[in-house]
Amino acid sequence: MPKLKNKSGATKRFKKTAGGFKRAQSHRRHILTKKSTKRKRHLRSDAFVHASDVGLVKQMIKA
């Protein structure tokens, strides 16, 4: 019988959309003083999970 529960960490990190799975950008938690404003601004936007990782994400959140 297959596993029923999702990976709860994955459900918090990924959101399923029509275009794929959205995820947040990394490198925005600390040591921000040396990073430029432009770099931090671009890191604010969400990105999509790469095609090679979509299968793993689907498996983790049972989508």
Image (cartoon, helix red, strand yellow):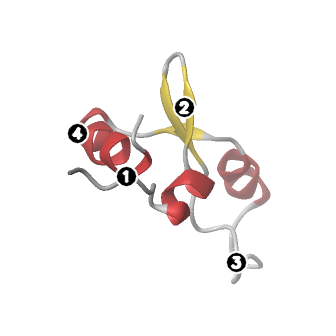
Q: Of marks 1 and 3, which one's residue comes earlier in the chain?
A: 3
Q: Of marks 2 and 3, which one's residue comes earlier in the chain?
A: 2
Which residue corresponds to mark 2?
Answer: 16
For label 2, the crowd category at 10 Å Cα-Cα, with few meaning under 14, some 14 to 19 and many 20 or more, is some
Which residue corresponds to mark 1?
Answer: 60
Which residue is drawn at the image coordinates 55% and 52% (left, top)?
11
Find the distance from the CA under tag 2 to the CA under tag 1. 12 Å
Q: Which amino acid does label 4 sit on?
A: Ser
Q: Of marks 4 and 1, which one's residue comes earlier in the chain?
A: 4
Of all residues, the one furthest to the front in this rendering is 1
Mark 1 secondary-structure assignment: helix
Which residue corresponds to mark 4?
Answer: 52
Mark 3 secondary-structure assignment: loop
Which residue corresponds to mark 3?
Answer: 34
In the rendered view, does 25 fall on the left or right side of 60?
Answer: right
Q: Of marks 4 and 3, which one's residue comes earlier in the chain?
A: 3
Find the distance from the CA under tag 4 to the CA under tag 1. 14 Å
Q: Are marks 4 and 2 in contact (CB under 8 Å)?
A: no
